[in-house]
Image: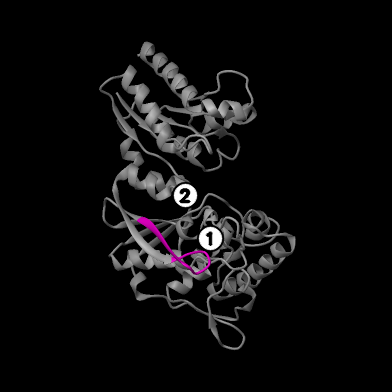
Amino acid sequence: MKFVLIPDSFKGTLSSSQICSILKEEIEKIFPGSDVISIPVADGGEGTVAAFLEAVGGTPVPVRVKGPFFDDVDCSYGILKDGCTAVIEMASCAGLPMVEGRKNPLKTTTYGVGEQILDAALRGIKRIIVGLGGSCTNDAACGLAAALGIKFYDGAGQEFVPTGGTLSRIERIDYTKSPLLEGIEIQAMCDITNPMYGPTGAAYVFGPQKGADAAMVEELDAGLRHLGALLDRDTGYPVSTASGAGAAGAMGAGMLAFLGSKLLPGIQVVLDIVHFDSLIKDADYIFTGEGLLDGQSLCGKVVSGIAGRAKLQDKPVIAIVGGVRDSEIQSAYEQGVTSVFTINRLPVPLAESCTFSAENLHHTAADILRLIRVSK
């Protein structure tokens, strides 16, 4: 038999790789000799590069770039096995863990992300995937753009590198970027739909977790409004209100305007990279899942993305989850999920059940596989 394992993580409990390992172990006990394909999934944040390299193979590339406060930091991105695709986590040089104890989205930058893109371009890469997640920034990718040769000028005609607190100073933008980027496709893994600014924009929704108090949120939002007007005018496209423009401190907007990037749901990027449609043609079962299956899960994220693709080939999809909102489960079935199983075995508080997640997943997987065996 052939099993394809492609779960999201159980946030804060089990990684996608751990879940794949547990499921594979149980499959090999009950269906020895089976073909088991493991595809760990990451959402664009920390762990995205590692997940891609584990899923399809490739090489990590160490680089030294500018960190959140323009300091030098060591990080890495991945070049996949095809030799033509690079995967970059913006969080590797502009992530929240890097500013613990000194959060300040007025001053942090995405400059190092641009440096990683340039490094990949110098190596002949033709497709770059940038994971937008876990950012400590609110600079709308202006730092990234500056690293790629795009120039920002203030009212006095002076060039500078904008951060979240200086976006309002931008009066003119020269969009000319490095010729090294010519012919390179740049995509962004983006799982949110927030616009660039406003009550549901980058500053108001995500600013507080990056260290912004109420006054700072207003200042950041004002800067985004100013820049958004410039981008909309200069590009002739409503960048500021585009779905996902507010991702990663409005990095989504910057990537649209400065690089012409596509903002794509992370799971769709993963499925294309691993050639999911071909991979499941001869599969007997597809296992997926996540910590909580709810309405958000079913709006283009991992479970719904997998189910939608599998449904086209009439392949059974089994979702193993930590918990589920029963009022929303019917939508999962309509999207292509065959059945949903929760791993929690006794009615205990979440904090307690999380400590037994690995053990409970083993038991639940074994029960499902035993049922499959007797039904064959």
Label 2 to label 1: alpha-carbon separation: 17 Å
277 relative to 86, above or below = above
Question: Residue at 37% of width from left, 22% of height from top?
Answer: 26
Local SS, label 1: helix
Relative to 332, 74 lies left or right: left
Residue 252 image label: 1
In the image, residue 288 lies at what x, y percent?
45, 32
Mark 1 surroundings within 10 Å by alpha-carbon count, few (fewer than 14), some (14 through 19), many (20 or more): many
Relative to 318, 281 lies left or right: left
Out of 46 and 290, give the one closest to the viewer: 46
Location of mark 2 (residue): 46
Identified by mark 2, the residue type is Glu
Out of 234 and 169, give the one closest to the viewer: 169
> Any magenta on residue 163?
no
> Any magenta on residue 70?
yes
In the image, residue 130 lies at what x, y percent?
43, 57
Question: Residue at 41% of width from left, 67% of height from top?
Answer: 115
Q: Earlier in the sequence, mark 2 or mark 1?
A: 2
